[in-house]
Each structure stands twice: as structure tokens, then as C-alpha cells.
Amino acid sequence: MRRPLCIIQRLGRATGSGGPRSAGTAHATHGARVSRTVAAAMSGLIVLATSMIPAAAATVDVAAAPARTQIIMMKDNGEVIETPGAHESRASLSIVKLYLGHWVLQHGAPEDKALVYEMIRSSHDGIASNLDRKYRQAIPDTIGRFRLAETNYRGRWGDTTTSVHDMAAFVRAVRTDPAARPLIDGMRNPAAVAADGYPQNFGTATLPGIEGTKFGWSDKRDVHATVSFGPGFVVAAHTFGSAQVHTDDVRRAVHTDGPVAGTQQIQIGGVTIPVASGAELKARTRCTKTEQFWQGVPDTVLVPRYVLDVIPAC
């Protein structure tokens, strides 16, 4: 891996106040105020540009995974590493919301498309149930389109079964599709606590180098699943057990390199500063007036987390 490059940029001019205000345009005034806020926040922005982690650095020790946990890793180079149970169809939990959301983004009404990001980000059951009732063909059509042969829709999203193979294959297929952006943004920026109050901090999300995750858990909290993507790979896991058991099994068997999302730090002048990824920055601003400004920021660079805290979020 190449040595990280530290770049200090002053971006105030890029988001500056611009020309004179037009009288009576409150909307423009608000936009200028937002721009000034962003400019102030980004003045002195420190970007730590890190190299992409090679896909070869990610692997699975199949022998280390107990039978209760299915695991699969699919790499961009075509390599697939899987445990013996990777093709077993188990309860899909909330992972199936990815299948539902993708169809809605393609075919749903505009007001329903707007709900997909939040459904993924906070794993919102209410949104999923409403969309599933309205679009009964959504999950079956997704199953057919992506050839998810180990996924079975039984009339309700919550009763669907799938395999870690299908989870990973689906995410690998859509992760670079612009039409699936709200899905991927929701995975990149999951709520710390889901809509039902359950923490989203377990499983494959805890692996180094992970850039986005969809979480799933049973009503009794005794079955857990996660599917994540990182540089050059997608990894999925499903466990008959608690969130901690799921995490322990994943961490024992799956090995990746890179910073753990949300825990990166940099030191400047003896001061330790928490940082976030460029991908998180873009996900946070995806529906703001500053969205276009941030599109040139690489997903893999690190920026001070305080910057994200002061930028108006979606």
C-alpha cells in the first residue's frame, strides 16, 4: 500500500457567497446561507487520501466459521470464497429490503422512490410493509431479474428467505449502478439505531475497510445477517445467534485490511481528529444544494468528522 498523502485545501472560494442577492428571493438567501456554512466548515479541510485496498487483502477462513453461520465473499476479480452452507435459503430478515427497494427505484411512483433511502438506512419496517403491499410484484420481479435462485418470496417481505450467496450476488450487481444509488447510499450511511430501536453495529460492518452495510435481525433478536461491500469485494453472513455471536463468527473467519468505518483518526499538531470517508460525506449531502460540489471527492479519502457534523444533512 502506498504511503498516505495529506492534503490541506481551502475550499471557501468553491462554496463562496457568490454574486449579489436578488431582492425578495428567500430561497436564494437560504442557499447563500447554506453555502457560507459549508464554506466555513470546509475552510482548512484536511483530506487524507489513502490508497485503495487491494482485493487480494480480503479473504475468508472457511474452516473458522461454525455451521450456525453462513459466509460468502465475492471479489471484483471473480474469486468467490464461501462456507459449505452459503447456498442454504434462510430467513432473509431485513436484507430483502434491498430487493424490494431496487424494484421501487426502477418502477415505483416518485413519492415511493423517495422512501427507499430511509427504508435502507434505518431498516424501516413500516416503509417496507407499505411498499410491499403496494407493489406485490416487486420482490418476485427482482428475484427473476437477478436470478436469485435461492430466494423465495412467500407473499410478504418478512416471510422471504434468501441465501448469503444471493445477498452478495445482488449487492455486487447493483453497487455501481447509478439507478441503485439510494440503496447504496443507505448502506453507506446506516443509522446508528434502526427505526425499531435496534443498534446497527454488528457483523460484517465491523470488519476493516467496509464502506457500506445492510443489517438484518429477527423479531426475537436470535437470528442476524449482514451484507457489506468494501474496496474490491462484497461479503455476506447469516447467523443463528445473537448480534454478538454473529459478529464474533464473522471476525473470526473473515479477514480484511483497512480502517474500520467510523473509527478512523488522524493526528495534526498533536491533536487527534476523528475522520470519515468521502463516501460518507457524499451520502450525507446527497439531497442538499451542495451535492454537486462534493461529487469530485473520492470515496476513499478521509475528512474530519466535524465537517460532516456541521454540513446540513438530508
Image (tube, rainbow, N blue to C red):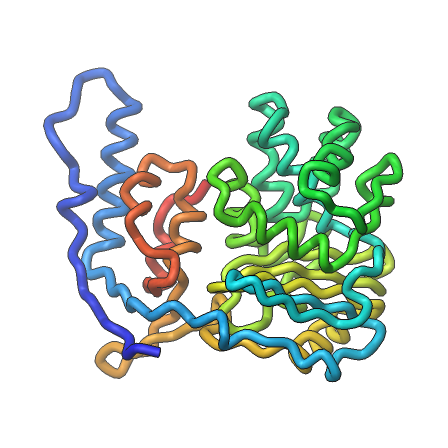
Image mark count: 0
Query: Which residue reaches farthest front?
Result: 78
Furthest toward the top, the residue is: 24
Q: Nearer the viewer, residue 156 or 307?
A: 156
Left or right: 156, with 290 as reference point: right
Q: Is residue 307 above or below residue 26?
A: below
Question: Is 123 above or below relative to 68?
Answer: above
Residue that appears at 40% across and 63% down = 276
Q: Nearer the viewer, residue 126 or 247?
A: 247
Q: Is residue 55 left or right of residue 128?
A: left
Residue 241 visible? The answer is: yes
Answer whether residue 202 is visible to the viewer in this image.
no
Looking at the rendering, which quadrant does residue 201 occupy? bottom right
Left-right relation of 244 to 5 = right
Residue sitting farthest toward the left: 20
Question: Which x, y percent locates residue 97?
Answer: 70, 43
Q: Nearer the viewer, residue 210 or 195?
A: 210
Place of residue 238 in the rendered image (x, y in percent of width and height, measured from the top left): 76, 64
- Measured as percent of width and height from the top left, residue 308 is found at 38, 55
Task: Name the residue rendered at 64%, 49% in the picture.
Answer: 170
Q: Residue 48 location, x and y as percent?
A: 29, 68
Q: Residue at x 16, y 37 (%)?
A: 17
| Image quarter (top left, top right, bottom left or bottom right) of the N terminus | bottom left
